[in-house]
Image: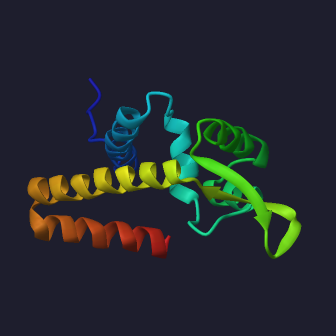
């Protein structure tokens, strides 16, 4: 019989990400049931002063076509709008509408709640250690 090995850290990080992101997604879904998990790629990578579609897609590591579909969807739902880019009037910036700002605030509130829950689960020292370890992985890999 083969020995079982504990899950790899990468698998654990992915599972933790899925669980935590689902909490944030459920908060968004409570505001608007039409919100889909894929929309998080837009909300997470937006820049509040506006962003071009190509840059948004690059930050999310998606094709411009796939990102364009998500932006179109969120524009139809009233969360985003396209405006002329002051730096190049031929280009468009994607910006939040008031509804998008409200959704963003709700997302931040859900994330703040997750941070409190993580501190309760891990203790403040454990939460701080996890934060430091993840930051180091992000910056040093």
Furthest residue toward top: 1
Residue at the image point whose x is 59% and y is 41% from the top: 78
Residue nearest the observer in this picture, 6 or 22: 22
Query: In the image, 89: left or right of 79?
Result: right
Q: Position of residue 36 (x, y in %)?
A: 51, 33
Q: Position of residue 139 (x, y in %)?
A: 47, 75
66 versus 100 height, above or below: above
Residue nearest the observer in this picture, 87 or 37: 87
Q: How is the image coloured?
A: rainbow
Residue at the image point whose x is 15% and y is 65% from the top: 126
Q: Position of residue 92 (x, y in %)?
A: 79, 60
Furthest residue toward front: 98
Query: In the image, 52: left or right of 132?
Result: right
29 versus 58 height, above or below: above
Furthest residue toward right: 90
Label total for image: 0
Residue at the image point whose x is 51% and y is 55% from the top: 44
Q: Position of residue 133 (x, y in %)?
A: 31, 69
Residue at the image point whose x is 77% and y is 49% from the top: 64
Residue 116 in which image quadrant? bottom left
Residue nearest the observer in this picture, 31 or 24: 31
Query: In the image, 112: left or right of 79?
Result: left
**Quadrant of the image for the N terminus?**
top left
């Amino acid at each position: 019989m083969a020995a079982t090995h504990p899950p790899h850290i990468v698998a654990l990080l992915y599972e933790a990400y899925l669980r935590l992101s689902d909490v944030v997604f459920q908060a968004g879904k409570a505001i608007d049931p039409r919100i889909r998990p894929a929309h998080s790629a837009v909300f997470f990578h937006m820049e509040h002063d506006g962003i071009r579609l190509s840059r948004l897609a690059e930050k999310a590591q998606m094709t411009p076509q796939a990102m364009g579909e998500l932006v179109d969807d969120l524009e139809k739902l009233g969360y985003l709008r396209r405006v002329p880019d002051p730096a190049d009037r031929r280009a468009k910036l994607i910006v939040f509408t008031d509804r998008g700002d409200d959704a963003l605030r709700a997302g931040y509130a859900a994330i703040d709640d997750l941070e409190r829950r993580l501190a309760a689960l891990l203790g403040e020292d454990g939460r701080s250690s996890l934060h430091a370890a993840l930051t180091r992985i992000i910056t040093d890999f």
